[in-house]
Image: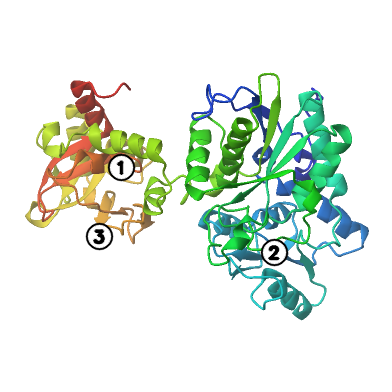
Amino acid sequence: MSGTLEITDIAGTIGRTPMVRLNSIEGMRGRVAADVVGKLEYMNPGASIKDRAAKHIVKQLDAQGTPKDALLVVAGPGNLAISLLMLRRKVLCLLPERTSADRVRLAKSAGAVDIIRTLDGALPGSPEHPSSVGKRIAEQRPGAVYVDEEDECWDFAQCYSELAAEIVEQTGACVDALVVGVDTGSTVTHLSRALREKIPSVQIVGVEPSGSAIGGQGARNPLARRWLCEDIGRAYAPRALAPEAIDMWIQVSDTVAYSMARRLVRAGVHAGPSAGAAVAAAHMYATGAALHAGQRIVVVLGDSARNYGETLLSDDWLLAHDLMDAAMLADIERTQIDQYRAASIEDLQLPAAVTVAENESVGCAIELMAENEFSQVPVTGPNRRLVGYLTLAAARMLAENGSAKLHDPVKLFMLRFTGRPAASTPAGLSPSSSTSLRKQYWLITPETPLSELARFFETHTVAFVTDASRKFCLGIATKQDLISFLARRNTRTF
């Protein structure tokens, strides 16, 4: 690769993605003799392999004389639409129900004209199928263009020839097998043809979720066609797939796909669930084919884990959907439960809280915090009820820039608590009518388990401990108190 760094537009940064060895990933280490390498397609600027297809779609639209502001009605799991939005095209997205909320928000933020959700298992020809929905919409919008990778009107041969050339260059043409997740069939079909021109003996392994019918295995049970892993799998064989492109099909369960994806993330490879499925399939293939040292498997890692903040990266979501394997469950149990051994906040032995009344002056509050080396102080209202808190850094900054006078009451500048948020809603700030801010309150008492407090500290810096009625502030806890407690128990090294 060229060592020259150049300033270019976003399209100029697509491709030339790196490769990394994956043999040290937990679950692979010591079990696979062959060299397993990942092609990090999620490191494209739009965080997916679909950047390559989007770039060539734009080229073809320009060659056809399609106006740059023409509406593109784009069907697919979301990555292609996001890539086209990145290339400054006007896009209406057709997204399956299973598409993650993170990708929906990204598409909206990138300027999607509209987002229409489609049924996960809709079959070709049905009115609910994305193709039927998309074409109807395109017909109703003058000048609109329907974009679907399954349509033969798009030529992706050059697109994936470039990817194949990169793989050949990076591996020195030493590739025994290529493992690719399959959705529309376009990527694997064109990539297979291009790579076999350079390396005729390469084996192509197609990956799909358990229950998918692309490779024919899911056709045995038409009702078992629902899975959670995004970007791979279909309830039918897509038109864009050339059957001869695949030498072997491997189906991977959701549990295996998500668990392997989390192991990739922990190892610094921030790829999504479909990549987890592909890496797991590479392990299965290497074991079944008895590959030996000196042979090499290339795995295409198609998109980023950052598209799945509420699913792949959420322990709660994985547990709710039973997607953790035994090793992950044991690790969660150890880190969230066993290390605290049923201890509660009372076991932290916190000193009694020092508070200020909301009518006290800012100057008195600053003096109190400075004398006691406090970073923050709880603020109480009528009947000494906890109503909020003030931080030393904020109070000093407000006093120095003149926003607050030292004789002003604390209540004008404190962070004021509101009611406790729903379990799925993170605490946040919203402006009130005065300089003070409102912060949602999370009830924490001496009986609160330390495992719950640890989760609270994932999004907060300080916990104010009160009685169950939230009348009195009994103490202040920080993550350091939790760390000190664990250190005393010698259960974890920080």
Q: Secondary structure at mark 3?
A: loop
Mark earlier in primary sequence (2, 1): 2
Residue 413 in the image: x percent, y percent? 29, 49
Q: Report the quarter where the C terminus lies.
A: top left
Q: Say above or below: 12 vs 6.
A: below
Residue 252 in the image: x percent, y percent? 56, 46
Rounded to the nearest angstrom, the CA distance separating label 2 from label 3 is: 41 Å
Residue 354 position by quadrant: top left
Amino acid on which the number 2 mark rests in the picture = Ala
Residue 140 position by quadrant: bottom right
Residue count near mark 3 (Cα–Cα under 10 Å), binned few <14, some 14–19, many ≥20: few
Q: Say above or below: 115 vs 307.
A: below
Residue 339 position by quadrant: top left
Nearer to us in this view, 351 or 155 = 155
Left or right relative to 485: residue 156 = right
Q: Which residue is mark 2?
A: 75
Rounded to the nearest angstrom, the CA distance separating label 3 from label 1 is: 19 Å
Mark earlier in primary sequence (2, 3): 2
Q: Which residue is mark 1?
A: 455
Amino acid on which the number 1 mark rests in the picture = Arg
Q: Which residue lies at the image location 72% right of the left edge and 36% below the top edge?
A: 178
Can residue 53 be seen in the rendering of this structure? Answer: no
Left or right relative to 345: residue 197 = right
Q: Which residue reaches farthest left?
A: 383
Q: Report the quarter where the N terminus lies.
A: top right
Rounded to the nearest angstrom, the CA distance separating label 2 from label 1 is: 38 Å
Amino acid on which the number 3 mark rests in the picture = Gly
Nearer to us in this view, 327 or 79 = 327
Q: Which residue lies at the image location 22% right of the left edge and 30% below the top edge?
A: 481
Q: Which residue is mark 3?
A: 419
